[in-house]
Amino acid sequence: MSEIVTNRLKSGKSYKAIFTMGSGKDRLRKSKTFSELRSAKTWLHELELASDRGTTFDMARWTFLDYYKHWVEIYKKPFVTPNTLYTYTISYQHFQEFFAGVRLEDLTRNLIQKYFNQLDMSHETSRKDLIHIRSCLRDAVSDGVLMRNAATGSIRIIADPAKTKSDDKKFMAIADYRKVRDFLLDYNYDMNDVNRLALMIISQTALRVGECLALKYDDVDFLHGTVRVDESWDSKHQYLKEPKTEHAKRTLPLSAKALAILRQWIGYHRATLFKLGIANPQHFLLLNRRGRLPVAGNVNTSYHQLQIRLGITPKYSTHTLRHTLASMMITEKDISISYISRYLGHASTMITEKYYIGLLPEQETVGRQQVLAVINQ
């Protein structure tokens, strides 16, 4: 039986609303104090409506950690890639220390904000944790476990600057990019240079590393001067998978010089693998002399070595080539944002605009000059 009584405790609030559901060991009792009778009645009415709609209040008494594990097992594990599932596991490890013993129903926006205030991780890591919390609580609301999502609304991410990759590490100066590009286009590749050839392809296409490693001979169309992207290689778990999104399946133009390098490479690659007695039944473009595809981390190491060789501070990851190319395209007024988004395999133009507009070092310099011109008018 639900009721509203006069609050006898000295809490400063006059009314206490009590909601009761079930009986015996299954009985659930919730209470809350209010300053106004109307607010108490509204709260009680919302709980009664939620109960009629089938809200699973029993699960709301689970700890957040237990519910999160249950949610990942049911809603994520069967549907996401091993790499993505790993990010949910990492978030759980972060949650363990701060949310230990906190019941799902007691999770508040205030508590979630306190978690991010003390997390002390990179911005990207913190962002993923917030996405996972919001998604978990959103499903809890959909399933009738909670009445509302405590993570809805503004929650600020407090990131550790030392662990967060700054823009100057995400985007190369155009002169440095061209130095890398020209070296890779003029290089004479052999079987010891598979990692470097992968860098050449990425520098010409802005492919993700996994997309590049998954390329096969027949993905290169010499007649039309294009390369087809429809798979990605997970080098950690050693398997081919679907690209990151459905939009990531695409066909990209290749420069004449890149096509010439790949034409020569495919002939050389086939012949060398045959001489070495290495089978390549799937016709992988970048199979190395050990009969394996490169590891993404090793491609990144090769890129750092190349930067040192070219006199560039070795602070850029392989993905920087993608970031830099994208930003260079955006500065060209004749290339539409829609085409750039499709070229990069993004799910929407919003992603392209969010991550790539106005971040090249040269763009910042031009922006400063334009601001000064306005001020000095």
Image: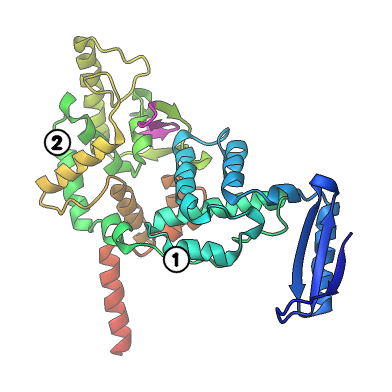
Amino acid type, label 2: Tyr
Residue designated by label 2: 187
- Residue 140 in the image, given as x and y percentages of width and height: 67, 50
Which residue shows up at 23% across the image and 19% down it?
Answer: 290
Judged by depth in the image, the label closer to the viewer, 1 or 2, is 1
For the residues labelled 1 and 2, say whether their Cβ atoms are less than 8 Å apart.
no
Q: Check if residue 227 falls in the magenta segment.
A: yes
| Other-residue count near label 1 (Cα within 10 Å), few / some / many at <14 / 14–19 / ≥20 | some
Q: Looking at the image, which residue is at 34% across and 19% down?
A: 283
On the question of residue 190 being in view, the answer is no
Q: Which residues are magenta?
A: 224-238
Residue 295, above or below 30: above
For badge 1, the amino acid type reads Asn
- The image quarter containing residue 126 is bottom left
Q: Quadrant of residue 234?
A: top left
Give the SS element for disc 2. loop
Q: Is residue 43 above or below residue 52?
A: below
Question: Magenta stretch containing residue 110, yes or no?
Answer: no
Residue behind mark 1: 117
Q: Secondary structure at mark 1?
A: helix
> What is the spatial separation of the Cα atoms under label 1 and label 2, in whole angstroms?
49 Å
Q: Position of residue 156 (x, y in %)?
A: 48, 67
